[in-house]
Image (cartoon, rainbow, N blue to C red):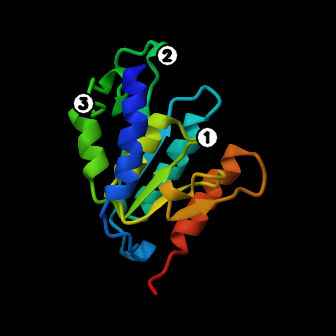
Amino acid sequence: MIRKLLLKIKTALALKKNDAIRVSDAYKEAKKIGLLYSLDENRSQELVEELIAKFESDKKQISKMTFVPVAAKLSDPGYAYFNEKDLNAKGNWSKHTVSEFKNEPFDFLVSLDWNQNKYTQNILAGSRAKCRVGRYEEGKDQYFEMMINPTDNQYASYLEQVYHYLTNVRNG
């Protein structure tokens, strides 16, 4: 309970204190893209892999971080992940890979979640990314520089639009 309260406070402070330069490069000039999402049985991992393949074919370096709730009972899913227990009593991430991901100066950090949760919001709030991208949710605009409102309620459409809009980002 205390951890969750501290997380909320730390997220609000991270939003206020984050001094990352939020000037996105043109997609053609971008080198690093971070993908942040939560484990979800309804999300097709195949669709995520297709998006990653598109980015990689454009010669982008991709880093992924997945929130896997403790309730999922996955001991080692085989990819970079974090869970509630990786949050220490002071409200800081104890897992080194989470801190590294949060501090990585991505050209674009894309949230692939349909709905944000407090753990991924904390990473978005403290991120050093030049441009944070996510699905439009009312009241969540402080976490993103670019929000995408899918034309329908299909996850595949959202991922297609993420790719479409990112590849059309141009300077000035």
Identify the secondary structure beneath mark 2. Answer: helix
The residue sitting at 32% across, 27% down in the picture is 87
Chain-order first, disc 1 or disc 3? 3
- Farthest residue in the left direction? 96
- Residue 89 placement (x, y as % from top left): 27, 23
**Looking at the image, do the residues carrying marks 1 and 3 touch, with CB atoms under 8 Å apart?**
no
Confirm whether residue 90 shows in the render.
yes
Tell me which corner region of the image, top left, top right, bottom left or bottom right, holds residue 123.
Answer: top left
Q: Is residue 4 above or below residue 165?
A: above
Confirm whether residue 77 shows in the render.
no
The residue sitting at 25% across, 41% down in the picture is 99
Q: Residues within 10 Å of mark 3 (few under 14, many from 20)?
A: some
Identify the secondary structure beneath mark 3. Answer: loop
- Which label was assigned to residue 115? 1
The residue sitting at 60% across, 25% down in the picture is 41
| Viewer-proximal residue among 72 and 58 | 72
Residue bearing the label numbered 2: 72
Tag 3: amino acid: Lys
Instruction: Give the quadrant of the N terminus.
Output: top left
Tag 1: amino acid: Asn
Residue bearing the label numbered 3: 95
Closer to the camera: disc 2 or disc 1?
A: 1
Q: Residues within 10 Å of mark 1 (few under 14, many from 20)?
A: some
- Residue 2 placement (x, y as % from top left): 38, 22
| Viewer-proximal residue among 116 and 62 | 116
- Residue 19 placement (x, y as % from top left): 30, 64
Report how far apart the C-alphas of labels 1 and 3 lie in the structure: 24 Å
**Looking at the image, do the residues carrying marks 2 and 1 touch, with CB atoms under 8 Å apart?**
no
| Viewer-proximal residue among 107 and 145 | 145
